[in-house]
Image (spheres, helix red, strand yellow):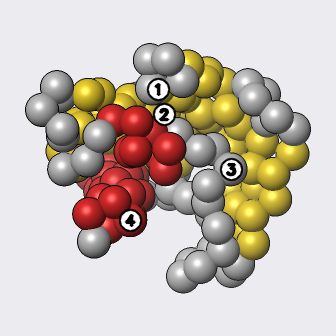
Amino acid sequence: MAQAKVVETIDASADAVWQILGNFKGIQPGPGIDAVVYEGEGVGMTRTISTSNGDVVEQLNVYEPEARQFAYAITNDAGPLPFALYSATVAVNDNGDGTTTVEWTGTFEPKGVDEETAVKFATGIYTRAIDGARTALTG
């Protein structure tokens, strides 16, 4: 299994960061995403992210708001991403000084590409999501 991990600090409170990154229903259509459909509530719910290359179906497997962490998995290995057997964990950690460290870790088998390319692809997704939260909170 390959692993991709991004650890970044955001100059905002952990609660504020969690409000954005901890919202499993927070993905909206935009560049690269044509539509998002959410089904269910809480642990077990799914989101189907539709792109021009196909759909990615993700299932929420763990949701712990008190600990500010959640885990999810891609349930359709036939999707357009270069991953099979994909799962990830997102943790939002209060640094005690008004800043927050986000740790986003994914594990998967590379699909159709070498491991380095798959890891780079995953870390790009994580970095863009964290940057989106940073921009929303700090401008």
Real-space CA distance between mark 3 and mark 2, rounded to the nearest whole angstrom: 16 Å
Real-space CA distance between mark 1 and mark 3, rounded to the nearest whole angstrom: 15 Å
Is residue 138 visible in the rendered structure shown here? yes
Q: Give the residue type at disc 4.
A: Ala
- Disc 1 to disc 4: CB gap under 8 Å: no
Instruction: Give the tally of numbered discs.
Output: 4
Q: Nearer the viewer, residue 64 or 59?
A: 64
Mark 1 or mark 3: whose residue is earlier in sequence: 3
Q: Residue at x 75, y 50 (%)?
A: 47
Give the image location of residue 85, x and y in percent.
Answer: 58, 34
Q: Nearer the viewer, residue 32 or 22?
A: 22
Give the image location of residue 26, x and y in percent.
Answer: 62, 55
Is residue 78 visible in the rendered structure shown here? no
* Residue 122 horizontal side relative to residue 77, left or right: left
- Disc 2 to disc 4: CB gap under 8 Å: no
Q: Secondary structure at mark 4?
A: helix
Mark 2 is surrounded, within 10 Å at the Cα level, by few (under 14), some (14 to 19) or many (20 or more) other residues, namely: some
Q: Which residue is mark 4?
A: 136
* Residue 55 horizontal side relative to residue 128, left or right: right
